[in-house]
Image (spheres, helix red, strand yellow):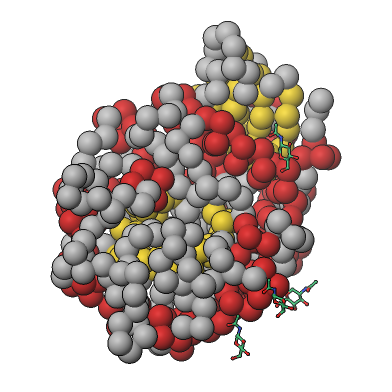
Amino acid sequence: MCRIVFLLAVISILCPSAEALDNGLALKPSMGWLHWERFLCNTNCDTDPNNCISESLYMQMADVMVEEGWKEAGYEYVCIDDCWPSTQRDAQGRLQADPKRFPGGIKKLADYIHAKGLKLGIYGDVGKTTCAGYPGSLGYYETDAQTFADWGVDLLKFDGCFMNWTLLGEGYMNMSKALNQTGKSILYSCEWPLYEWAFHKPNYTAIRETCNHWRNFDDVYDSWTSVKSILNWTTFYQDIIVPSAGPGGWNDPDMLVIGNFGLSHDQQETQMALWAIMAAPLLMSNDLRNICPRSKMLLQNSRIIEISQDPLGKQGYCTAKMDSFEVWERPLSKNRLAVAVLNKQEIGGARGFAVRLIPGWKICNPQCNVTQILPQYKEMGVQTQRSSIVLSVNPTGTALLTVTPISSYYKKLYKLYWKPMSIKQNTIL
Ligand SMILES: *[C@@H]1O[C@H](CO)[C@@H](O)[C@H](O)[C@H]1NC(C)=O
Ligand SMILES: *[C@@H]1O[C@H](CO)[C@@H](O)[C@H](O)[C@H]1NC(C)=O
Ligand SMILES: *[C@@H]1O[C@H](CO)[C@@H](O)[C@H](O)[C@H]1NC(C)=O
Ligand SMILES: *[C@@H]1O[C@H](CO)[C@@H](O)[C@H](O)[C@H]1NC(C)=O
Ligand SMILES: *[C@@H]1O[C@H](CO)[C@@H](O)[C@H](O)[C@H]1NC(C)=O
């Protein structure tokens, strides 16, 4: 699946390296809410009814998503993670929701979510049991796919615990086929590469043909250490993973933890900016019923969401590391560029970064138009390749810009510039 363009030389750049799973979904990175990081496997509805994994948790999130601008901002999927099922399958071998915590059952919950104009995600596992020990789908792929389709589920997050790794790919492919054979398009979110990397390099061509997004690395935690480790992993393997992303299939660096306890506001801005640059699914795991207004504004920032959802569908690269700064760049439609400058120094105050050091700044020859989106919105006006603007970036914070070339030569420059580039060629140490 790729954009058809008439400049032959550009075609290989606009098409991801392989065909995406053809279910018509995830043409842009998915947006929504997923319970895991914030609510984990809290099944204790007797003592913690407000935060336990129960149908009312998803109904309340759906209500808030509609009432408080989340749906309007683009957040669409309300997703259940582990710990929803009963520990036993029913007499026909089908999964069933825990009867005490989901008295209405999943079908009724899906109807409720759909009536709000939202979509419901559910969770399963390719192996014998889920990570938390609930029934897995091994040996039941067709049954479970049909059950999810019958319930009206719109997305399946399929984990990889308790699976013989030599059969991992086969299991994920079999489930993909089973979902397809239900005749209902169900967005398929995999963790295949995450579980395979422990043994060997995954085949991203096969993964892209099978899944709509795929987790590569560890679960996100509510901490800067965790967000940092995900960014580090991504820069380390970007030459392998970035080319596999595009409409229909995306690398998944895991949930947004913005609005919780562990990240400073600068760090929250870094997560939001970099997840947009990485063309990552934007699945929040937080408590939308009680979230600080500044985090809410950040998560609903339409200019950042526009970068995330850009129709060109290219994932960005880390293009330079220098003096404890990282520069990340994502090509956007209409020859524009999104640039994030991250200050990785965890001591002192804000530091200055000269924009002319951004590798992609060459599109500002002869001129470009620059808009700063983070830390605050600011029209920076017309600039040139020799601009003397200096961005001020807080420790662990990020400045986010969009750059629009003003040039009759932009097409030529665009072709020159948008070779997938590797940090190794661009690193200034
Ligand atoms: C099933 O796969 C075929 C072939 O890839 C595709 O054309 C069709 O749209 C898919 N159906 C669903 C429901 O995903
Ligand atoms: C995993 O599967 C392979 C291939 O089917 C088999 O040879 C191996 O014994 C299995 N390993 C375990 C631990 O079940
Ligand atoms: C996948 O499907 C094939 C064909 O039905 C079957 O032989 C194989 O055992 C399945 N593998 C797994 C892991 O379910
Ligand atoms: C990767 O998967 C693709 C598509 O399934 C296949 O054609 C290719 O041979 C595989 N590559 C390797 C190295 O196994
Ligand atoms: C970054 O990731 C690579 C690859 O996983 C790892 O070898 C390295 O230790 C990581 N660096 C840091 C600072 O975490």
Residue 186 relative to residue 128: left or right: left
Quadrant where the C terminus sits is top right
Relative depth, front residue between 361 and 255: 255
Residue 51 relative to residue 180: left or right: left
The part of the image, by quadrant, that contains residue 304 is top left
Residue 347 relative to residue 356: left or right: left
Q: Where residue 406 sits in the image (x, y, percent)?
A: 60, 38
Q: Where residue 341 sits in the image (x, y, percent)?
A: 60, 28
Question: Does residue 293 show up?
Answer: yes
Count of numbered circles on the image = 0
Residue 54 relative to residue 361: left or right: left
The part of the image, by quadrant, that contains residue 353 is top right
Taking the spot 59% from the left edge, 69% from the top edge, the residue there is 163
Quadrant where the N terminus sits is bottom right
Relative depth, front residue between 267 and 312: 267
Relative depth, front residue between 136 and 178: 136
Taking the spot 64% from the left edge, 71% from the top edge, the residue there is 164
Taking the spot 36% from the left edge, 85% from the top edge, the residue there is 93
Taking the spot 30% from the left edge, 82% from the top edge, the residue there is 90
Q: Where residue 192 sits in the image (x, y, percent)?
A: 60, 65
Q: Is residue 423 above or below residue 214?
A: above
Question: Does residue 206 show up?
Answer: no
Q: Quadrant of ligand 5?
A: top right
Residue pushed farthest top? 348
